[in-house]
Amino acid sequence: MFETIFNRLIGHEGGYSNNPADPGGETNWGISKRSYPNVNIKKLTREGARVIYKKDFWDRISAGKLPDSVAYQVFDFAVNSGIETAIRYLQRAIGVADDGHWGPTSYAAMAKISESDVLMLLNAERLDFMTRLKNWPNASRGWARRIAQNLRYAAKDTL
C-alpha cells in the first residue's frame, strides 16, 4: 500500500524549489534542506525521496497498522507539518489526549469512530491548525488545495 500512498503524496510535492518565503528553504520532492542538511537536495531523485519518506515518515508513524485511508491522511499531514503534529491532531480528532504518541488508547478510540468521520475530523483539525500558521498568508492557497484533494481521496477511499 505504501507505493500507492507515496504516489499520491508525491503529487502534492513539487520538484526543486528554493523559495525564500518557504520556511523549509531549499526543497525537492517535499524533502527540505532544513530537515536533511546532509542531502544534496538539488540532485535528490524521486527514488531517494521515496526511501526517506518510507523510513522517516511511514515507518515512524506505523502507517501500515492504520486503515489505508487514515494512513494516507496522517502520512500526508506528517510530511507537510511534522510527525508529532500529525499524530497530535489525529488524537484530537478522535477525542483522546494529544500527547503525540500513538498507542493502544489511541487505537481503541479510533476503532469506535467510523472511518469517514475520522477522515473528516482529521482534515478539519488540519485545516484549523494550518490557518494559525505564520506562513498561512503566503501558502494558504496551496495548502487549502492540498486538503481539498485529500478530502476527495477520503471520499473515494471510503466508498
Image (tube, rainbow, N blue to C red):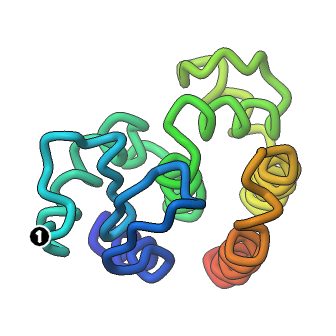
Give the percent coordinates (x, y) of residue 99: 66, 15
Residue lying at 35% horizontally and 48% vertically, measured from the top left? 58
134 left or right of 33? right
In the figure, residue 7 lies in which quadrant?
bottom left
- Looking at the image, residue 10 lies above or below residue 56: below
Residue hosting label 1: 43
Give the percent coordinates (x, y) of residue 69: 57, 64
The crowd level at tag 1 (other Cα within 10 Å; few <14, some 14-19, many 20+) is few
Residue lying at 38% horizontally and 75% vertically, measured from the top left? 10
Give the percent coordinates (x, y) of residue 65: 42, 43
Looking at the image, which is closer to me, 20 or 94?
20
Dot 1: what SS? helix
Residue lying at 27% horizontally and 72% vertically, measured from the top left? 3
Q: Amino acid at mark 1?
A: Lys
Residue 114 in sight: no
62 left or right of 45? right
- Looking at the image, residue 86 lies above or below residue 130: above
75 left or right of 88? left
Looking at the image, which is closer to me, 68 or 30?
30
User: Given the current orientation, which residue lies at the most extreme front position?
Assistant: 20
Quarter holding the C terminus is bottom right
Quarter holding the N terminus is bottom left
Residue lying at 11% horizontally and 70% vertically, measured from the top left? 43
Residue 136 in sight: yes
Give the percent coordinates (x, y) of residue 112: 78, 38
